[in-house]
Amino acid sequence: MFILDTMNGLDISEIRRKYEEYNRYLENIKDQLPSGIREYALAPWHYQVGLRDARCPHDAWVESLEISEIAAQESVETRQVHITLQLLNAFHTAHLKFIYTGVSSYTVSMADVTNSPLHDSVNRGHNDWLIDEIRLTSERRIVHEIVFALGSHWTIESEGMSFEFIPR
């Protein structure tokens, strides 16, 4: 991650400093972000203290990850990758849906915990969404980086991204 990378073992003042640095970064790039992403990235509930808002992705679980390759209308050979990620929120009362369009790169890794003290967690999927970070490349592409509790790590770079809250 860019700013919120290594917060394990840090004291609360250092964690706050990292969040403040990240918020300054978002303030600097907010006018370059598409409105839907700007609203998500800067939302007061995104990293809400106490995590009491159902829209907050912290502790959400992955329900589905769909990667599709769409042909352009003008040519079947012109293709565009889209990714749809759906989560069950921490309260199990809603779905959180992220749609990435014009994906240029992605890495989706699942931590191997079979030989670790966490081996009981193998059947827990990716486990809880811990933290995510939005940033821009020099070409103004959106990078969304996500870290899960057991160490899974996803990075998606795209032209567009949207977030949707869907009550159950």
Image: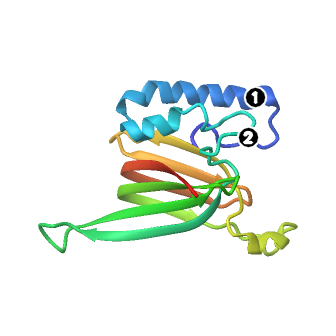
Q: Are marks 2 and 1 in contact (CB under 8 Å)?
A: yes
Q: Quadrant of residue 154?
A: bottom right
CA neighbours of label 2 inside 10 A, class few (<14), some (14 to 19), many (20+): few
In depth, the one of 35 and 71 nearer the eye is 35
CA neighbours of label 1 inside 10 A, class few (<14), some (14 to 19), many (20+): few
In depth, the one of 4 and 74 nearer the eye is 74
Residue drawn at point x = 50 percent, y = 48 percent: 144
From the viewer's perspective, is residue 126 above or below residue 7? below
Element class at badge 1: helix
Residue drawn at point x = 19 percent, y = 73 percent: 77
Residue drawn at point x = 15 percent, y = 67 percent: 73
Check the image and name the residue furthest to the right: 117
From the viewer's perspective, is residue 1 above or below residue 105? above
Left or right of 92? Residue 63 is: left
Quarter holding the N terminus? top right
For label 1, the residue is 14
In depth, the one of 147 and 125 nearer the eye is 125
For label 2, the residue is 7
Check the image and name the residue furthest to the front: 168
From the viewer's perspective, is residue 54 above or below residue 71? above
* Residue type at tag 1: Glu
Quarter holding the C terminus? bottom right
From the viewer's perspective, is residue 163 above or below residue 20? below
* Residue type at tag 2: Met
Left or right of 78? Residue 43 is: right
